[in-house]
Amino acid sequence: MCRLQSSHILNCRLFVLLVAVLCVASCTISLVSSYDEVTDKAVQDLAAKTETVIADATTNGGSYRKHAGFYTEAQGSINAIEMRSSLYKQNEAEINTLGKLRTAMHNMGRIHQIAGSLRSEEAEGVRSLLRSLIHHQIAKKRSAQITAPAS
Amino acid sequence: MNFEETLKQMLSAASKAAKGQWKAMSDFAETEFRRLGASAMKLEANFAADMLEAATQTSAKKRTKMEKIAKERATLAFENLKLAAEAVIEMFKADLKLAAQDAVNAAMKVLATSVNASLGVPLL
């Protein structure tokens, strides 16, 4: 009778252990929002347009007047990317960086406007912020490959 | 299921996943800080040169205007470098979380594969 009881307890413990292992093994943790291809592409597009303007302004002396439309369009693009980023949970770093990019883009436009020209080092803040965003998308993409279920 | 072997594989997968993210983010942060530092030095030199050029103006009105522009463009450009440096740190922290997440998930993936192999059915 006593042997039967202890065997039953052992079976229960093994069952609980098996369930625990299955639960742990079947779950993945998420500390940062997942990779979003649309955001990635939008950041890349904004970076390409920004580089074109910086190249024209720093090497050809392209005026603010010529590129005024770009600065307005860039603010719109940043707002649209931020709107999409805010739909994801645990995405604060990306949203904060987009806010910084908005301020930096406005500052760069102001320099371009008051000085009538733009120096390469004056565009470095905006460039660096775009690189940070692109790098973060690459890190998320790499992470998505690790988190993907084994085929 | 060989628990010791599975544990070894889990640790190896976790370490590999975390190292991949760590190398990428530390290389990126170092390069960015170097670039931002170099730009700050150039901005400083530009500001000094602009102020010097303004000082050579005979017209007081023109001199004041040039000084004002030099100060404003330097202030805005330095503010942008500060924002960029803050973003590098913020992204570094987010990527650290990603590295931790990848390490745990890579280990879980090994465990799931091992459990499936042990049961003989793709349960997980």
Image (spheres, rainbow, N blue to C red):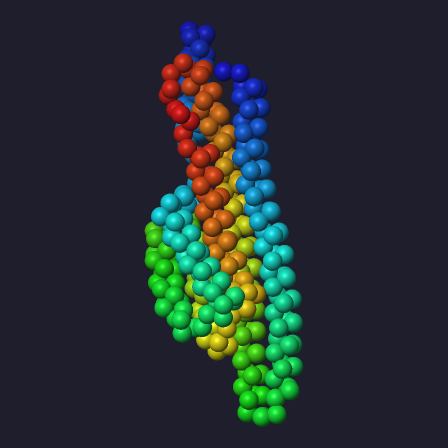
Determine which quarter of the picture holds residue A24.
top left
Residue at x-position 42% and y-position 52%: A44
Residue at x-position 53% and y-position 77%: B72
Query: Would you place residue A103 above or below residue A89 in this image?
Result: below
Q: State the image coordinates of residue B80 (x, y, percent, origin top left).
A: 52, 66
Query: Would you place residue B116 above or below residue B67 in this image?
Result: above
Q: State the image coordinates of residue A20 (x, y, percent, origin top left).
A: 43, 26
Outermost residue, front side = A60
Q: State the image coordinates of residue A69 (x, y, percent, origin top left).
A: 36, 68
Residue A20 seen in render: no
Determine which quarter of the picture holds residue A63.
bottom left
Quadrant in which the N terminus of chain A is drawn: top left
Quadrant in which the C terminus of chain A is drawn: top left
Residue at x-position 57% and y-position 28%: B12
Q: How many marks?
A: 0
Q: Is residue A49 left or right of residue B84?
A: left
Which one is nearer the viewer's eye here, B32 or A15?
B32
Residue A36 seen in render: yes
Query: Would you place residue B57 above or below residue A1 in this image?
Result: below
Q: State the image coordinates of residue A117 (x, y, percent, origin top left).
A: 50, 73
Which one is nearer the viewer's eye here, A27 or B83?
B83
Query: Would you place residue A79 above or below residue A146 in this image?
Result: below
Residue at x-position 45% and y-position 64%: A53
